[in-house]
Image: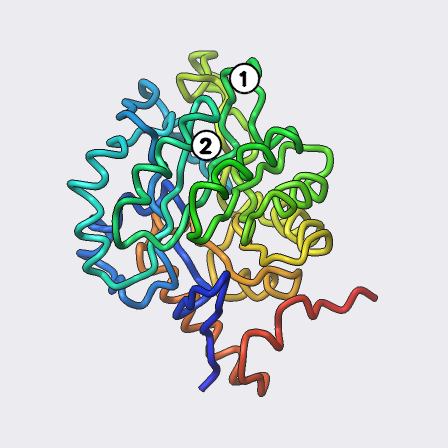
Amino acid sequence: MADLRIIIAGVEFPTPVFVASGTYGYGEEAGAIADLTKLGAIVTKSISPEPRLGNPPPRLFETTAGLLNSIGLQNVGVEAFISEKLPFLRRTGVPVIVNVVGKISEDFFRVVERLEKEEGVTGYELNLSCPNVKEGGLEFSQSAAVAAAVTGEVRRRTKRLLMPKLTPNVTSVAEIARAVEGAGADAISLINTLTGMAVDIETWKPRINTMIGGYSGPAIKPVALAKVFQAAGAVRIPVVGIGGITGWQDAVEFFLAGASAVQIGTANYLDPRKAIEVADGLRDYLARRGLSHLDELIGKMQKS
């Protein structure tokens, strides 16, 4: 049987198929349907220092080949996460990566410093694709210097796995990837959502309250693949690919393009067992190709 185990920054993951932040809640809801112990890792809903109510509805709209959202990073806040959500996540025995978000750099530091006092946290995914209030709304990961500064400051506060999540909405994702690698990141994940919108032609109004939101789902996979390929070619640390994965075949493409792991996002809304299905399909694919380990697949795309 093919071995799907991977190691990132000294942490062993049972499979390279994780569930993405914002699409799996805090795990407990999906646990009624899916066997969480078969997941590679759970990446939690974004956690901020204080609770956030998120944006007013409508804030979700399903398009022809994807999902437009403007949830607004709704979450319970770090204290409620620790008291109400983390105990369940600990009991799963699955690696838990907490997605951390903030309006300013100090918000990231506050969340990480608080979580450093708790057991059961494998590492942190820094949501750098949110607006930085100090920079006039510019995303943290649209500036190599800002992304590196936040990553470096968090690195000084933790020895746990540290993984900045990068935006596709930049000219050169390779530049940002190299910057966070230099600042001490153990891995990077990408892509976060593209910007998008939809309009109701009967009412002449936008389909979501904020007009422009984050676009995810099958339609963004080619963009995500290209960004993962560019990032993987620019850094020596592992790249975790995200974007439009709905089956094991999609995951194989990401591994061939250079990803060391993948995250399932929007597809979780259709089936919370999707990550398990993808891992099973990936295992069968490797066996069918006569490959014993995932390493024999990563970055092996033939370029000509």
Res 23 → quadrant: top left
Q: Which residue is mark 2?
A: 68
Relative to 186, is 181 on the left or the right? Answer: right
Residue sitting at 39 percent across and 42 percent down? Answer: 99
Spatial CA distance of label 1 from label 2 is 20 Å
Q: Are marks 1 and 2 in contact (CB under 8 Å)?
A: no
Q: Amino acid at mark 2?
A: Leu
Relative to 183, is 81 on the left or the right? Answer: left
Relative to 4, is 117 on the left or the right? Answer: left
Camera-nearest label, 1 or 2 = 1
Q: Quadrant of the C terminus?
A: bottom right
User: Residue 125: x, y in percent?
Assistant: 45, 45
User: Residue 255: x, y in percent?
Assistant: 59, 64
* Disc with the residue nearer the chain's start (1 vs 2): 2
Mark seen at residue 170: none
Q: Which residue is mark 1?
A: 137
